[in-house]
Amino acid sequence: MFVLSTGYAERVELFWDIGTLNISRDGYSTWKSICVNNAVPIPPVHVTQGDVLVLNVRNSLDTPTAVHAHGIYHNYTDYYDGAEMVTECGIPPGENFTYIIDTTDQVGNFWLHSHIQSQLTDGFRTPFIIHEKVKPVTYDEEKLLYFEDWDLRSFDDQMNIYSTLNAKKIPIAYRMLLVNGMNGNVTQPVVFEPGKRYRVRVVSLLTAFWLKFRMPGHTMHIIDQDGVACNPVEVDGLDMGPGQRFSIL
């Protein structure tokens, strides 16, 4: 990553080579996952409000790809929206494309993913966090928790199963829930220290299911939802649909 100063904002430039990697995301079974620069999970992207994200993408897959910034407005720049065959064509295999995303008017929790075929469910997804220049509330530290549904079958294989005449008899079920990209004995613990006040960014990268998020013995206060700040609201948990994002204290 290269960061160049442009006045009060920064130009945050990333270079992504999109490919695949055979990896165990549960510590037991190996399966093909879409990767960026041979990294799985794809590292979250962090910028500060007002920054310009320059995302240089090379497609090393054998099918077209694209990058959609979920929840981001594209005022007169819809050709950077990443919705293939709606706002633009996909990036052909072996080709490059540069996305330019201005974050002047938005802040909060978003995510980046592909809108092409089954690439999202095959691992092409990661959080995109736009930090405030000034904290809206007081806290000691931030944590990021993001969740994915994952299966040891490609989405295309699953659709072939669920599209049969007997599909109604087959429950739609993923093998596992990934926490920050992993599960099982390869999961990295998220550590909280007693006495500290935390802002926790909770991002659902799920594709088909609702997530019930709870912290036993604790209530929480929502301070933003889907990129929109709000006055703190006390809740005992979050019920999150696919693509929803919250910040809680």
Image (tube, rainbow, N blue to C red):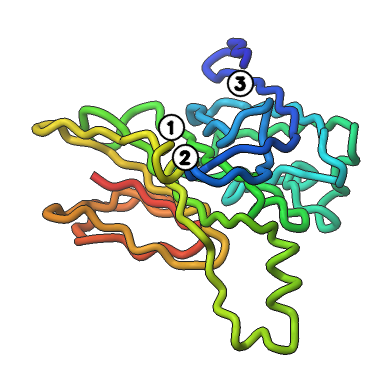
- Quarter of the figure with residue 139: top left
Q: Which residue is mark 1?
A: 131
| x, y percent for residue 150 | 55, 54
Residue 12 marker: 3
| x, y percent for residue 46 | 50, 29
Q: Amino acid at mark 2?
A: Val
Q: Residues within 10 Å of mark 1 (few under 14, many from 20)?
A: some
Residue 107 marker: 2
Verify CB contact (< 8 Å) between mark 2 and mark 1.
yes
Alpha-carbon distance for marks 1 and 3? 13 Å
In the displayed structure, 181 sits above or below 98; it is below
Residue at disc 3, secondary structure: strand
Alpha-carbon distance for marks 2 and 3? 16 Å
Residue at disc 1, secondary structure: strand
| Quadrant for the N terminus in the image | top right
In the displayed structure, 81 sits above or below 45; it is below
Residue 227 marker: none
| Most foreground residue, 1 or 214 | 214
Alpha-carbon distance for marks 2 and 1? 6 Å
Write the residue at 89% across / 32% down: 95
Q: Earlier in the sequence, mark 1 or mark 3?
A: 3
| x, y percent for residue 181 | 49, 41
Q: Amino acid at mark 1?
A: His
